[in-house]
Image: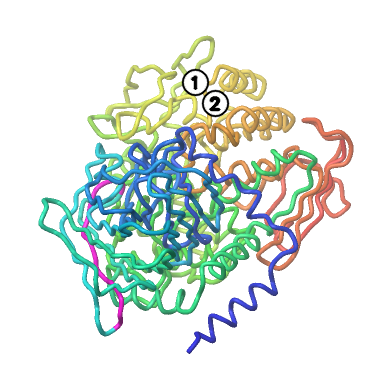
């Protein structure tokens, strides 16, 4: 009997398919080439799985163009500095070679789309096709006539162990077995390594195929090996696989609910329509095909992580949403989450519910990088607070404000370092990222103060508002860089400033700064830019300093702390300079061929590009947007509220429009409040 619910869903999605095919504008190789660590394979928006080809030197995304393909794994993280996953590897073969490096195949005729992947394995003359569902995928392997056909299922393989071994991956065993009752091949593996907890985590699977799975031969005699040979008795094999982080039973349920009686063509169309509908929330008008492809590719990257694994929480039973693989919120709070507030408020509210649920069950308060909800390390600050505050000040519905505020308040007085709470800075006596942590703590305090005001907790509001100015204690007016002075820097407990080079860009988890320098972090005062300008000698002096920082590449957007820095010019009544430097950064640091300046960072870089293309940029955690020259003459956003935000540019665009009109009324300054546009609006730039 057919799954009538799925047939109904398929019919409805086909009926609701958008007129334009936005998914086909996405260039899946952007960010796969270069060093941005994006994943080539398809998935659904915020899907739990991301099936993709892997190659020997595929890096953290698993795949390197031009290399032979080793197989197709079901789980990946996209755009991260370090990888994770890469398990449940399938490798169709003629003959059977199970060793890790024994079945690589040169490829041709590769097609990569957000919703579909196809390739010819030239070594074996096997065409592979695949399309994703939320928790699984359907494969079609087309073999040539004759020969010894087989399919390898490798459960020991992972990216951290076999593709990027320097991130210390390990396989701890598992199981592959045929279930005669269900007719499915099921199993699991236990792993660790890469970003996330050092604690091992399990990956479970269930496979259905139109070849006899009971004939599968399982081998686990070799050290660190667990693989199976699935004999192939026909020229074309259709295989369906579902993956769970929780149990075999859950994987079987996903297989039934998402893939029962679904063909490859149907899964492909369902996935395509899901992407067309999501990407179609923003329409742009341009005469440049490349600019349009770049826009929708960065939009695509904005929508793949974190993973929505609601109902598949491996750590506790809960009816609350469960979002995993935040890699990481230190990146995504600045642009990714504000973009989702405009386009899909429910995604944000459900994320916040998952944060609250995590706090209530295991007390971990800042899931910077989560996988199985065990890892609490962070790159700086308590930045979940900024996501929640951003939602609260913008009036997002769908989550418990009181529980969310209790979470923020507890963090403010328990998770900030004791030294920060005592001194207002972190004295540098061997602690990591003492300056950057303190700068982020100050903004976390401001965000929680905003929430306290909304919740009418005036005592906490007053305390945290005052504490949010602590960054000023790190501002050293004598610290010199070339002809410029006045930067944040480290101090000892006795208040003495420590000598260091403000131009030096620091690495990960080291002294003073996290992946940045004093130039970049000095500009990170989102709540008190006016005070920063005053300390820097006033607007004239600060403009000169900021321009030099950008021109000399001492301030860059290779990492997220620099995201807001071009918008400082707005606070000195020079939005034209904001537009100039934003356009410069967009054109020199983002391209289809080279990808992003550095890691894409789970949608953070992609959504920065989207906002700056719109000419509308959030000061995340607060309720306003900066207006800059948009990249397109006509833009329409389908908002969460159901309304439309229509942005137009008339005349020949420059960095300095003659006027900006909101719903026909001329604006006095190039800033809008969220409530100005939440239910829809018309923004007109006149040049």
The residue labelled by disc 1 is 486
Q: Which residue is drawn at 64% across and 48% down?
A: 296
92, 294: nearer the viewer: 92
Q: Which numbered dot is residue 387? A: none
In this figure, which residue is indicated by the disc labeled 2?
535
Describe the colour scheme in one phrase. Answer: rainbow
The rendered magenta stretch, by its main secondary structure, is classed as strand
At mark 1, the secondary structure is: strand
Q: State the residue lying farthest toward the top.
A: 483
At x 34%, y 17%, the residue is 499
Is 107 inside the magenta-drawn segment?
A: no
Q: How many marks?
A: 2
- Report the magenta residues as a range: 182-195
Outermost residue on the bottom side: it is: 1
Q: Position of residue 127 (x, y in %)?
A: 46, 54
Which sits in the foreground, 183 or 676?
183
Name the secondary structure under disc 2: helix
Q: Do the residues labelled 2 and 1 touch (CB within 8 Å)?
A: yes
Residue 681 x %, y %: 79, 57
Can you see residue 615?
yes
Assess disc 2: are there few (<14), some (14-19) or many (≥20) residues with their C-alpha within 10 Å of its C-alpha. some
The C terminus: image quadrant? top right
Mark 1, residues whose alpha carbon is within 10 Å: few (<14), some, or many (≥20)? many
Inspect this view and state whether residue 621 appears. no
Q: Which residue lies furthest to the front in this view?
A: 146
Report x, y in % for residue 481: 48, 14
């Amino acid at each position: 009997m057919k799954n009538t619910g799925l047939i109904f869903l398929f019919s409805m999605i086909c009926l609701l398919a958008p007129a334009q095919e936005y998914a086909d504008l996405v260039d899946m190789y952007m960010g796969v080439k270069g060093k941005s660590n994006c994943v080539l394979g398809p998935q659904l928006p915020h899907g739990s799985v991301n099936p993709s080809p892997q190659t020997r030197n595929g890096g953290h995304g698993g795949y390197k163009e031009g290399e032979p393909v080793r197989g197709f794994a079901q789980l990946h993280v996209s755009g991260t500095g370090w990888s994770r996953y890469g398990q449940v590897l399938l490798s169709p073969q003629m003959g059977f070679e199970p060793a890790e490096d024994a079945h690589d195949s040169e490829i041709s005729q590769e097609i990569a789309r957000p919703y579909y992947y196809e390739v010819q394995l030239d070594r074996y003359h096997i065409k592979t096709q695949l399309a994703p569902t939320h928790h699984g995928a359907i494969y079609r392997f087309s073999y040539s006539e004759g020969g010894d056909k087989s399919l390898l299922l490798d459960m020991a393989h992972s990216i951290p162990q076999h593709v990027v071994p320097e991130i210390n991956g390990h396989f701890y065993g598992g199981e592959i077995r045929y279930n005669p009752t269900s007719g499915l091949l099921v199993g699991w593996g236990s792993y660790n390594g890469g970003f996330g907890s050092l604690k091992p985590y399990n990956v479970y699977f269930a496979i259905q195929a139109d070849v006899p799975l009971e004939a599968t031969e399982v081998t686990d005699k070799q050290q660190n090996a667990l693989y199976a040979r699935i004999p192939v008795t026909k020229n074309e094999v259709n295989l369906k696989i579902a993956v769970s982080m929780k149990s075999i039973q859950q994987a079987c349920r996903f297989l039934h609910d998402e893939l029962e009686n679904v063909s490859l063509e149907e899964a492909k169309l369902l996935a395509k329509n899901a992407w067309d509908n999501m990407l179609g929330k923003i329409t742009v008008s341009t005469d440049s095909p490349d600019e349009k492809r770049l826009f929708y590719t960065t939009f695509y990257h904005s929508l793949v992580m974190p993973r929505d694994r609601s109902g598949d929480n491996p750590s506790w039973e809960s009816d609350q949403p469960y979002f995993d693989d935040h890699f990481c919120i230190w990146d995504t709070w600045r642009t990714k989450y504000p973009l989702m507030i405009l386009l899909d408020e429910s995604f944000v509210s459900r994320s916040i519910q998952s944060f609250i649920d995590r706090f209530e069950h295991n007390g971990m308060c800042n899931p910077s990088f989560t996988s199985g909800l065990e890892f609490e390390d962070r790159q700086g600050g308590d930045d979940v607070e900024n996501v929640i505050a951003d939602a609260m000040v913008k009036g997002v519905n769908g989550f418990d404000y009181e529980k969310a505020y209790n979470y923020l308040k507890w963090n403010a007085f328990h998770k900030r370092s004791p030294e920060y709470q005592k001194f207002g800075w972190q004295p540098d006596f061997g602690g990591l990222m003492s300056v950057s942590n303190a700068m982020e703590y100050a903004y976390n305090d401001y965000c929680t103060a905003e929430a306290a005001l909304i919740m009418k907790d005036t005592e906490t509001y007053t305390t945290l508002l005052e504490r949010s100015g602590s960054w000023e204690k790190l501002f050293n007016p004598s610290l010199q860089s070339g002809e410029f002075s006045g930067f944040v820097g480290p101090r000892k407990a006795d208040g003495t400033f420590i000598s260091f080079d403000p131009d030096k860009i620091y690495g990960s988890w080291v002294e003073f700064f996290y992946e940045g320098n004093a130039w970049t972090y000095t500009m990170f005062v989102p709540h008190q830019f006016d005070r920063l300008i005053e300390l820097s000698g006033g607007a004239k002096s600060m403009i000169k300093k900021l321009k030099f920082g950008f021109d000399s590449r001492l301030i860059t957007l290779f990492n997220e702390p620099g995201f807001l820095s071009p918008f400082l010019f707005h606070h000195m009544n020079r939005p034209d300079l904001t537009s100039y430097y934003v356009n410069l950064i967009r054109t020199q640091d983002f391209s289809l061929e080279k990808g992003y300046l550095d890691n894409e960072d789970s949608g953070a870089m992609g959504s920065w590009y989207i906002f700056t293309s719109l000419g509308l940029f959030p000061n995340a955690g607060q309720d306003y947007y900066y207006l800059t020259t948009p990249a397109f003459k006509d833009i329409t956003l389908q908002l969460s509220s159901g309304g439309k935000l229509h942005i137009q540019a008339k005349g020949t665009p420059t960095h300095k429009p003659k006027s900006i009109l909101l719903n026909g009324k001329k604006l006095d300054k190039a800033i809008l409040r969220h409530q100005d546009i939440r239910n829809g609006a018309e923004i007109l730039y006149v040049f």
